[in-house]
Amino acid sequence: MLQEIAHSSLRIMIGYFLLLTLTRFMGRKVISQMTFFDFVVGVIVGSVAANLSVNSDRAVTSGITVLVVLAIVTVALDYAGIKNFFIRKLTNSEPVVIIESGKIVAENMKKTRLPLDSLMMLLREKNTFNIADVEFALFETDGKLSVVKKSQKQPVTPADLNIPTAYAGLTKDIVIDGKIMHENLKDARLDRKWLMDKLKANNFHTIEEVFYAGLDTSGNLYISSRNRIKEKEGQYGME
């Protein structure tokens, strides 16, 4: 029995780490932009990995071979799609115009088999409640709807009013869970002494007291302390 458990555990470990490695090899597009092709690849990879983990009748090498070949084919088609529009269209399809100049393109609605109530739901998710406000709406290959409102219905921006604005970039993670992100600190051209002075000015005496600290592009340091007080039941909402 112990031998069987050890054998099954080994197969599961092989399947897990192989799947993790091949997924990273195939790229994050498979997860972030699920097209028809990516969906098929995901289903096959999941099925083969599950078979590899639990089906002791099949040889491990055959499952590994299928996964590796599938990953290579996927990456090869991705690279081919970059160079060749026909292959890209064949594997990922193309966006379809659903609304043009405030009018629904009925033919394309039928082509994509998108019901009207689903279209309205997708528009509401884009904070659009009137079809007449839409200049263009495209049904993307990953099933999402991209909406461009008419110029009269778009919110006013500082550029429209010729108002200058300060640059706002990404916040750098300086401390995460009591550990200094030295690479980010160095990239900001700061050192540990500066950080400790800032922490002391905010009544923090050690790095371990800080749960998170982030530096924005204006030079402001946001600090969040560890919550050492036990949460009362229902204190932060229903659980």
Image: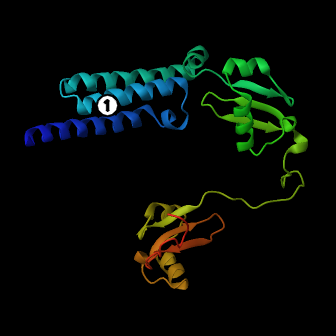
The relative height of residue 164 versus residue 50 in the rendered view (above or below) is: below
Q: Front-most of 1 and 132? A: 1
How many C-alpha atoms fall within 10 Å of the one at disc 1: few (<14), some, or many (≥20)?
A: many
Secondary structure of the residue carrying numbered label 1: helix
Q: Front-most of 84 and 148? A: 148
Question: Which residue is pictured at 49% across the width and 33% down the height?
Answer: 30
Where is residue 203? Give x, y as percent.
Answer: 51, 85
Q: Which amino acid does label 1 sit on?
A: Ala
The relative height of residue 116 versus residue 237 in the rendered view (above or below) is: above
Quadrant in which the N terminus is drawn: top left
Question: Which residue is pictured at 53% across the width and 73% down the height?
Answer: 235
Residue 104 falls left or right of residue 229: right
Residue 124 falls left or right of residue 55: right
Where is residue 42? Give x, y as percent.
Answer: 43, 29
Specify how the rendered protein is coloured: rainbow
Question: Which residue is pictured at 37% across the width and 31% down the height?
Answer: 46
Residue 209 lies in quadrant: bottom left
- Identify residue for label 1: 49
Where is residue 48? Give x, y as percent.
Answer: 32, 26
Residue 25 falls left or right of residue 13: right
Where is residue 68? Give x, y as percent.
Answer: 32, 25
